[in-house]
Image (cartoon, helix red, strand yellow):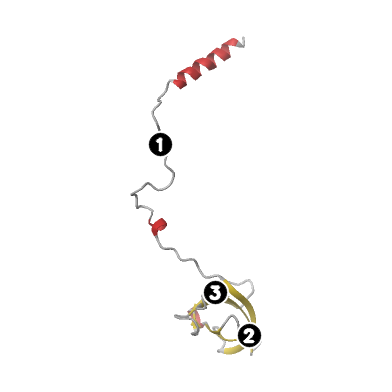
Amino acid sequence: MTRAPLTIMLAAAAALAGCNNSDHNIVQGQVPGDDTNAAANANVQLPPAIAASKIYRCADNQVVYVDWMADNKSANIRTDPSGSPVQVAAAEAGKPMTGPGGYELSGSAAGTTAKIAIPHHPSQSCKV
């Protein structure tokens, strides 16, 4: 009784061994000369790293959280420690950074004071 299943398996293996023996070339990735993946060919710029994260207390007792970026031209401002950041940026390093809704930031990551303006609060000097 055990010979019948063994014989059937050997016959099936022999039948499958005789199937199409042509070579198959499977190429992983982009085919040479195929420019359909434009994202792979684009010059991708990574966002700047965070150079310093500081907590400032302003003249009206408002607490502001600032993440200074390493490019010295941008920063993220939050008024709540777990809130969404608002990005402010300047055209060149050392200039005041501005953002949507009236956000403005002057200062540097190395300094202990900054001039910060957020919506519904006037521009004021803030200290670490």
Question: Is 10 left, or right, of 29 in this rendering?
Answer: right
In this view of the protein, which residue sits in the foreground, 75 or 110?
Answer: 110
Quadrant of the snapshot with the C terminus: bottom right
Mark positioned earlier in the residue sequence (2 or 1) = 1
Q: Nearer the viewer, mark 2 or mark 1?
A: 1
Measured as percent of width and height from the top left, residue 77 is found at: 57, 77
Please tell me how many numbered marks the rendered image carries: 3
Q: Position of residue 104 (x, y in %)?
A: 52, 84
Circle 2 packing at 10 Å, graded few (<14), some (14-19), many (20+), is few
Q: Is residue 7 left or right of residue 61?
A: left
Q: Quadrant of residue 105?
A: bottom right
Taking the spot 63% from the left edge, 78% from the top edge, the residue there is 54
Kindly identify which numbered label has been placed on residue 113. Answer: none
Q: Are marks 2 and 3 in contact (CB under 8 Å)?
A: no
**Relative to 3, does residue 27 appear above or below in the rendering?**
below
Q: Earlier in the sequence, mark 1 or mark 3?
A: 1
Give the CA distance from mark 2 to mark 3.
17 Å
Within 10 angstroms of label 1, few (less than 14), some, or many (20 or more) residues?
few
CA–CA distance in space, label 2 to label 1: 63 Å
Write down the residue under mark 2: 112
- Quarter assignment of residue 39: bottom left
- Secondary structure of the residue carrying tag 2 is loop
Distance of mark 1 from mark 3, alpha carbons? 47 Å
Q: Residue at x 48, y 17 (%)?
A: 14
Residue 25: image tag: 1
For badge 2, the amino acid type reads Thr
Mark 2 or 3, nearer chain start: 3
At which x and y percent is residue 34? 34, 49
CB contact under 8 Å: marks 1 and 3: no
Question: Would you name the residue on which mark 3 appears?
Answer: 70
**Which SS class for mark 1?**
loop
* Figure quadrant of residue 44: bottom left
